[in-house]
Image (cartoon, grey):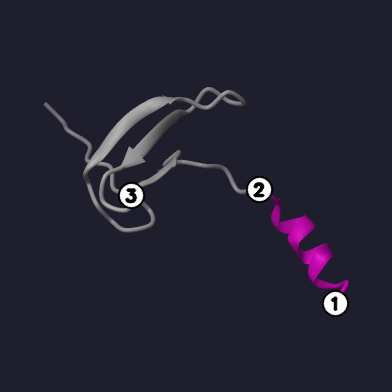
Amino acid sequence: MIQITKACPHCGSIDLVSNGHNKKNGKQKYYCNGCDRYGTLDAAPRYSEERKEDSESLF
């Protein structure tokens, strides 16, 4: 049997607890007992690379 261990992207702890699903896209949400944070492990980037480059050219 293959077991996949997921770690918190903030602190690296593997002490995660599933905590419902995201309303927007239905992805699994987790709570980290190590750093007391909530979130999804495979969150999509908020902005595309093209949009980031456009905003950097403004400054």
In three-dimensional space, the C-alpha distance between marks 2 and 1, rounded to whole angstroms, equals: 20 Å
| Residue 6 highlighted magenta (yes or no) | no
Vertical relation: 5 (above or below) 56: above
Could you tell me residue 28's position as x and y percent? Answer: 42, 28
In primary-sequence order, the first of circles 2 and 1 is: 2
Mark 2: give few (<14), some (14-19) or many (20+) Cα within 10 Å.
few
Q: How many marks?
A: 3
Residue pointed to by mark 1: 59
In primary-sequence order, the first of circles 3 and 1 is: 3
Amino acid identity at mark 2: Arg
Residue 8 is tagged as 3
Could you tell me residue 42's position as x and y percent? Answer: 46, 41
Residue 46 is tagged as 2
Element type at marker 1? Answer: loop
Q: Quadrant of residue 19?
A: top left
Q: Are marks 2 and 3 in contact (CB under 8 Å)?
A: no
Give the magenta part as a residue range. Answer: 46-59
Could you tell me residue 4's position as x and y percent? Answer: 22, 37
| Residue at 26 percent of width and 45 percent of height | 33
19 horizontally vs 42: left or right: left
In three-dimensional space, the C-alpha distance between marks 3 and 1, rounded to whole angstroms, equals: 33 Å
Mark 1: give few (<14), some (14-19) or many (20+) Cα within 10 Å.
few
